[in-house]
């Protein structure tokens, strides 16, 4: 019989389709090659030597004495040329026809170019380079969090065409927005409701229970834990949480950012090897910067490999069907060497 499971942090229901369950290694399918021509590689706007093809850099980690927007960098942050939100404008909200609400699309949309090397990604970079990327996440998050117009800041990475990437060169993105999207607000409100009822953070309780049960834990370090959630919405959906309670990503220290880079890289290396370099998205979800230090929420990363399709039932009901039992996915990944 199928199993209906509820995520205690979001109250979302998921169907674990046991009778339709597939073996975890069934998802290591042959991917069509996404070959690039030599010309496409040479014209990549994110490659070293093509700095003049991007907007002017916001910050970079670069060799001493090299100038902005020139070679010599190993991590570079630039405004997104096709930004979803842009600085400036009026933060006030208006009504049109005394009914429809709107406001200027103010915000920030930045690209973190993760390395000068065109054909790498997080799972194949060396550890030090991934640490530098995550330190850049921290630096830009702290800078953007100082703007009182920004309600929410989201860091995300799209890997592969089915995950939404249009440029192969390794990069992440960070968007600061003046409004909190409904599905993010839902997660915040459910965590707040749990705290009101129990007096504890639901993610702290989830983390403790996953350690106690020890059926879905994939990796663990001194300060972080990686596991397949009890109510995984899709095959190999993976959470990474700091063990110490932190509501907002701005609270992460430099040393913790390096350790976060370590467990993320090793998790993605396992997924890369197990599933033949699947397309994926990862997202760092956090309480708003104004609520840093809060007790009810707990920032975390969600990794979502794109190995199954969302169909009509999911779109119509909001209930996802997962054909891989999370306990089996965790055991499978745990046995893969990083």
Image: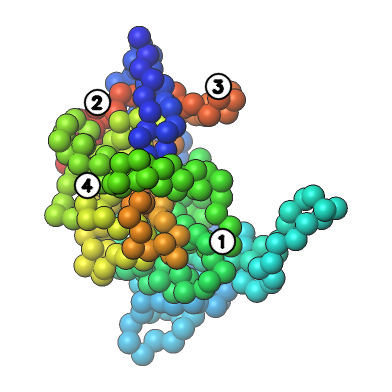
- For the point 53% across and 71% down, which residue is it? 148
Pointer 2 or 1: first along the chain: 1
Q: Which residue is mark 3?
A: 313
Q: Are marks 4 and 3 in contact (CB under 8 Å)?
A: no
- Residue that label 2 marks: 328
| Figure quadrant of residue 88 | bottom right
Q: CA distance from mark 3 to mark 1?
A: 31 Å
Using the image, tell me which numbered label, if any, was put on residue 177.
1
In front of the other: 229 or 148: 148
Label 3 crowd bin: few (<14), some (14–19), many (20+), radius 10 Å = few
| Image position, residue 12 (x, y; %) | 44, 32
Question: How far is mark 4 from mark 1, CA to CA?
Answer: 29 Å
**Numbered disc 2: secondary structure:** helix
| Residue 108 occupies quadrant | bottom right
- 53 left or right of 218 in image: right
- Which quadrant of the figure contains the C terminus? top left
Instruction: Answer with left or right where residue 197 lies relative to residue 255.
Output: right
The residue at the point 18 percent across, 55 percent down is 223
Give whichever of discs 3 and 2 has the lower sequence position. 3
Q: CA distance from mark 2 to mark 1?
A: 38 Å
**Disc 2 or disc 1, which is closer to the eye?**
1
Residue at (29% x, 64% y) in the render: 252
What number is the disc on residue 225? 4
Return the residue nearer the eye: 160 or 88.
Answer: 88
Residue 56 location, x and y as percent? 55, 78
Q: Residue at x 44, y 77 (%)?
A: 59
Task: Between label 2 and label 4, give the one nearer the viewer.
Answer: 4
- The disc label shown at residue 208, or none: none
Mark 2 neighbour class, 10 Å CA radius: few under 14, some 14 to 19, many 20 or more: some
Provide the secondary structure element on which disc 1 rests.
strand
């Amino acid at each position: 019989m199928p199993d209906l499971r509820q995520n205690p942090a979001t109250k979302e229901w998921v169907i674990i389709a046991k009778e339709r369950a597939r073996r975890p290694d069934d998802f290591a399918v042959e991917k069509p090659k996404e070959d690039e021509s030599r010309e496409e590689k040479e014209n990549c706007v994110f490659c070293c030597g093509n700095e003049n093809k991007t907007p002017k850099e916001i910050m970079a980690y670069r060799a001493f004495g090299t100038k902005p927007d020139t070679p010599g960098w190993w991590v570079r942050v630039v405004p997104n040329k096709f930004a979803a939100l842009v600085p400036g404008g009026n933060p006030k909200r208006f009504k049109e026809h005394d009914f429809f609400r709107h406001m200027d699309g103010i915000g920030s949309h930045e690209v973190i170019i993760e390395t000068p090397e065109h054909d790498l990604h997080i799972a194949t970079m060396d550890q030090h380079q991934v640490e530098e990327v995550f330190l850049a996440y921290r630096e830009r998050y702290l800078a953007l969090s100082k703007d009182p117009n920004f309600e929410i800041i989201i860091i995300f990475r799209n890997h592969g065409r089915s995950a939404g990437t249009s440029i192969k060169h390794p990069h992440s993105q960070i968007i600061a927005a003046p409004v909190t999207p409904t599905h993010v607000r839902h997660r915040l409100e459910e965590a707040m409701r749990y705290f009101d009822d129990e007096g504890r953070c639901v993610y702290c309780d989830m983390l403790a229970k996953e350690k106690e049960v020890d059926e879905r834990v994939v990796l663990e370090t001194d300060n972080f834990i990686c596991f397949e959630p009890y109510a995984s919405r899709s095959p190999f959906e993976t959470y990474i949480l700091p063990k110490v309670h932190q509501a907002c990503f701005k609270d992460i220290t430099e040393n913790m950012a390096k350790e976060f880079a370590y467990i993320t890289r090793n998790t993605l290396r396992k997924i890369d090897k197990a599933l033949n370099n699947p397309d994926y998205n990862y997202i760092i979800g956090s309480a708003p910067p104004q609520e840093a230090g809060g007790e009810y929420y707990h920032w975390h990363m969600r990794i979502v490999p794109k190995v199954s399709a969302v169909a009509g039932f999911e779109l119509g009901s909001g209930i996802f069907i997962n054909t891989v039992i999370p306990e089996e996915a965790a055991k499978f990944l745990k046995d893969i060497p990083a």
